[in-house]
């Protein structure tokens, strides 16, 4: 497509991406914008980043830019760093000799690395891309767009359509199923029948994807501002089950409290993202696993005779352990998840200094937000408790005192509205073991 036949103007392209392409061209290499940025520009949307491809090898790219870092495990790539903006530059990829897959297990990761760095022509590079609208190449040297897979038709019809035979492409890389859903929701498009049909049958292939890659993908799925709609579409296509096997059995009934709770958390997260407020995956994962945790803790109490406190602690560990078999959760997030959960059992206990200690806990705010959605979901005492904390945290010291006095009177002096909640059982005083440090 010559310039007159498409809507992409240089003004919509990042200056840094233009600089990178001009420098590559001046050194005698080809260079193109490709992928999401060309697609988004054709849709009249603002791209979130600009990716460049070239026939220069990573070493040749490095030789041209002093602000260049070579990175990548699955693919070797060049990052050209301009302050906060990074322009990713990849070398055209060629076909794998033996049709090697991106999704092979750890055992083959060594070989995978070599095979993923087979370089090729622009035609081969286009064939390896996933959806037709992701294989359009913009050339700043002559302002043309080369559309290898009829992406402009997909854009005009607002259709998500895989390049090649969908079943083959999903088997090569099952993450493409997640990407199909993500783009359909994000771009407000429909998935063509041929691209949608194999998904339910092949959803289980996501079990073969390394948990670390799935962690990255789930961030894109749930923390891009359309998490709620994406979640519902994934559930509909049977793609949630391999990601969250402990949760999905609890979502059979779309009117259940579990469903209500998760959709509310996702809606709140979307709103925060769309208002540029901070979000953490820890909160989302804590929410996805909250009801599985409660169920498991109750089971441990009933079947193993554990006290509520121990049952809850052990269940927290178990539930996280099972989840990370599917999706890796970095320690810095799982620690916060456990804090949020543990604080759910401390929030009802407000007697004396405890209420003030709670306010200064670093995770108070997250725990309170979590409690609020639980209250909105379940109503009753939980909602009252959330409302109490809402008033208490913003009250002046005098009012806070009066709230605590009122609470003590209401609760008959126990100050511990903790009925039915796990509580650490008082241990009888024990002699310190010999040789203990503070003995
Ligand atoms: P976004 O706007 O979300 O970044 P994107 O299409 O740019 O969307 P990226 O993950 O940045 O998505 O990938 C850039 C390009 O690389 C894609 O447009 C596509 O051409 C190609 N690509 C990415 N992942 C795959 C995959 N799993 N299989 C084939 N091609 C892929
Ligand atoms: Mg991109």
Image: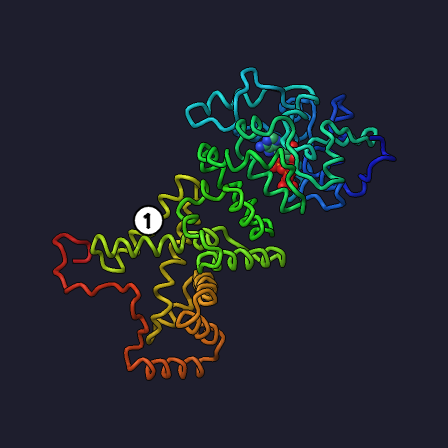
Question: Quick one: which residue is furthest to the right in this view?
Answer: 4
Judge whether 169 appears above or below 178 on screen: above
Left or right: 354 in relation to 64: left
Residue 79 in view (yes/no): no
Q: Residue at x 31, y 70 (%)?
A: 418
Q: Quadrant of the N terminus?
A: top right
Q: Which residue is mark 1?
A: 317
The image shows residue 322 at horizontal and vertical percentages of: 36, 43
| Up/down of 416 relative to 216, above or below | below
Choose between 230 and 15: the one closer to the eye: 230
Q: Quadrant of residue 156?
A: top right
User: Mark 1: which secondary structure?
Assistant: helix
For the point 37% across and 47% down, the residue is 320
Position of residue 225 measured from the top left corner of the image (x, y, whole percent): 60, 52
Front-most of residues 82 and 380: 380
Residue at image x 56%, y 44%?
Answer: 220
Residue 231 visible in the shown view: yes
Q: Residues within 10 Å of mark 1 (few under 14, many from 20)?
A: few
């Amino acid at each position: 497509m010559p310039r007159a036949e498409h809507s992409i103007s240089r003004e919509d392209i990042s200056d840094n991406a233009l600089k990178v392409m001009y420098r590559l061209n001046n050194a005698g290499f080809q260079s193109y914008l490709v992928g999401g940025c060309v697609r988004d520009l054709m849709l009249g949307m603002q791209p979130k980043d600009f990716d460049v491809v070239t026939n220069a090898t990573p070493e040749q790219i490095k030789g041209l830019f002093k602000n260049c870092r070579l990175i990548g495990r699955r693919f070797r790539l060049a990052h050209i760093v301009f302050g906060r903006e990074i322009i990713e530059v990849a070398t055209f990829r060629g076909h794998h000799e033996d049709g090697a897959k991106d999704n092979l297990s750890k055992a083959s990761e060594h070989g995978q690395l070599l095979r993923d760095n087979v370089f090729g022509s622009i035609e081969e590079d286009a064939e390896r891309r996933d959806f037709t609208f992701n294989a359009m190449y913009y050339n700043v040297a002559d302002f043309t767009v080369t559309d290898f897979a009829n992406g402009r038709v997909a854009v005009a019809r607002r259709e998500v359509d895989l390049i090649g035979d969908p079943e083959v492409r999903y088997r090569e890389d099952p993450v493409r199923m997640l990407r199909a859903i993500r783009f359909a929701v994000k771009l407000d498009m429909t998935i063509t029948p041929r691209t949608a049909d194999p998904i339910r049958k092949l959803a289980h292939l996501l079990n073969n994807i390394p948990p670390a890659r799935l962690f990255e993908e789930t961030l894109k799925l749930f923390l891009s501002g359309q998490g709620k709609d994406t979640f519902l579409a994934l559930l509909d296509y049977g793609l949630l089950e391999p990601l969250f096997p402990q949760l999905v059995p609890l979502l059979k009934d779309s009117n259940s409290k579990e469903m209500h709770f998760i959709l509310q958390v996702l809606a709140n997260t979307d709103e925060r993202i769309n208002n540029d407020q901070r979000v953490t995956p820890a909160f989302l994962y804590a929410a996805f696993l909250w009801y599985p945790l409660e169920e498991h803790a109750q089971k441990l109490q009933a079947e193993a005779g554990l006290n509520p406190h121990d049952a809850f602690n052990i269940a927290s560990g178990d539930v996280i352990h099972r989840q990370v078999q599917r999706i890796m959760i970095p320690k810095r997030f799982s620690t916060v998840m456990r804090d949020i959960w543990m604080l759910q059992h401390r929030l009802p206990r407000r007697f004396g200094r405890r209420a003030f200690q709670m306010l200064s806990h670093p995770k108070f705010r997250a725990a309170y937000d979590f409690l609020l959605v639980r209250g909105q979901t379940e109503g009753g005492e939980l909602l009252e408790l959330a409302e109490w904390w809402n008033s208490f945290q913003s009250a002046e010291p005098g009012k806070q005192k009066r709230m605590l006095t009122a609470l003590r009177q209401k609760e008959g002096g126990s100050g511990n509205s903790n009925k039915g909640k796990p509580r650490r059982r008082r241990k009888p005083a024990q002699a310190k073991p010999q040789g203990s440090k503070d003995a």
